[in-house]
Structure formats: structure tokens, C-alpha cells
Amino acid sequence: MSDTTDAMPAAAATPTTALITLSEPIARTGGDVAVLTLRKPRAGELRGLKVPDLATGDVDAILRVLPRIATPFITDAEAANLAADDLAQIAGNMIGFFMSQAEKAQMAAMMGN
């Protein structure tokens, strides 16, 4: 049986992490959290969710998966208490995890980048 990993096109690669600088840091006793690193979710972390909901930026879906993929770990309550602009930035990055390079290039072209 041959290894098919070499047959994967380079255009299918997408970033696996995103660094988010929060406009309103999460207040904690041990020190505020001003930056989150998001990791591209794995299949098991998407249990109970619909991928199209994440890909379209559904707030409930974003808030459910965020504690599963954020470093440092954040609680459900901390995720729900994020500022709207921070949530929008997080949602945009999560949507990017589900886009192919061709889709990203098309979006950049539409935005004039």
C-alpha cells in the first residue's frame, strides 16, 4: 500500500494556529490574559457541533469550541464574557481554519489585498 500524504496538493494547506491579541484582556487572579493562541480544531473537538455553523461564524458554535482550542485554557464563562470585537476577531480566524488556500486567495482579491 502506498503512502498518499505526498499526493496532497500544497494549496490544501491552511494555518494551524492563530494569535489573537484581546482588546479587553480576560481578568484573572494570577494575571490577565491578553493574548490567546487558537489551534485548528481536530475532529473530536467538534463533537456536538455542525461544521457549517463554525464556518459561517455562528456565535453559539464559536463559543462552544473556543475553550477546547484556546491556549491558555479559558472557561466557558470567560469565552461568553469576551468583548464583541474580540469575538469577531476569533470568529474570523476560526472561519479561516476551514477555508482552502484558493478560497483565501479569492477573499483577498475581493478585499483588494
Image: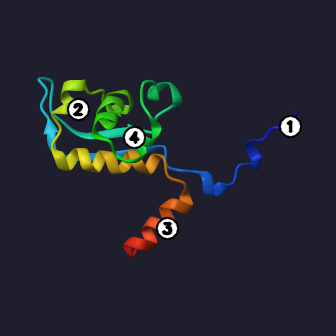
Q: Please, what secondary structure does the residue beneath circle 2 have? A: helix
Q: Residues within 10 Å of mark 2 (few under 14, many from 20)?
A: some
Q: Which mark is residue 70?
A: none
- Quadrant assignment for the C terminus: bottom left
Residues at circles 1 and 2 in contact by the CB criterion of under 8 Å: no
Front disc: 3 or 2: 3
Mark 1, residue position? 2
Mark 2, residue position? 79
Give the image location of residue 89, x and y in percent.
28, 50
Give the image location of residue 107, x and y in percent.
44, 65
Q: Is residue 99 left or right of residue 65?
A: right
Q: Quadrant of residue 10?
A: bottom right
Work out whether mark 1 precedes mark 4 in sequence or the reverse, and give the earlier one: 1
Point 43% across, 51% down: residue: 96
Give the residue type at disc 1: Ser
Work out whether mark 3 precedes mark 2 in sequence or the reverse, and give the earlier one: 2
Front disc: 1 or 3: 3
Q: Please, what secondary structure does the residue beneath circle 3 have? A: helix
> CA–CA distance between discs 4 and 3?
21 Å
Residues at circles 4 and 3 in contact by the CB criterion of under 8 Å: no
Mark 3, residue position? 106
